[in-house]
Image: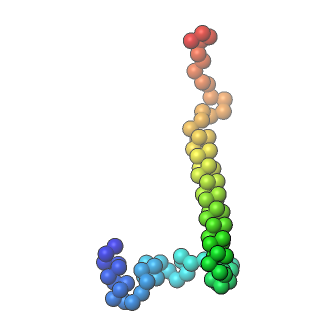
Amino acid sequence: MDALIRLAKVLHMRLDDLVFGENERGPGEDLALQFEAVNQFTDDGKQTVRELLEGKILKHEARRWDASRAALAQAKAPAAGGKRPVRAAGR
């Protein structure tokens, strides 16, 4: 990592530009204009947009986590029609 940082400094480039392809990390074209417009907001307006985005991202990540947890639980469940051990009454 240190070598990449030194290389970026020597080439007068940002590390992201050196490591990632053009526009690989930036917003897609569909959001780029909207983010440019947000740059013109007041500081309070920008903070509101940050909070909205953070909430939406957290909600998205929670849904992804829950879906993968459910899929894992389903994969661990016995197959339909499979026999489960029967416990004797009173035990």
Q: Number of marks in the image? A: 0
55 above or below 27? above
Q: Nearer the viewer, residue 59 or 81?
A: 59
Position in image of residue 90 (x %, y %): 60, 9
34 above or below 70? below
Q: Which of the 4 image quarters holds residue 52?
A: bottom right
Q: Nearer the viewer, residue 49 or 45?
A: 45
For the point 42% across and 80% down, which residue is it?
Answer: 15
Q: Nearer the viewer, residue 48 or 53?
A: 48
Position in image of residue 14 (x %, y %): 43, 83
Position in image of residue 62 (x %, y %): 61, 54
Residue 32 in view, yes or no: no
For the point 61% across and 59% down, which residue is it?
Answer: 58
What sort of colour scheme is used for the picture?
rainbow
Q: Which of the 4 image quarters holds residue 80?
A: top right
Residue 50 in view, yes or no: yes
The C terminus: image quadrant: top right
16 displayed left or right of 89: left
Position in image of residue 77 (x %, y %): 60, 35
| Residue furthest top as drawn | 90
73 above or below 88? below
75 above or below 83? below
The N terminus: image quadrant: bottom left
For the point 59% across and 40% down, which residue is it?
Answer: 73
For the point 33% across and 88% down, which residue is it?
Answer: 10
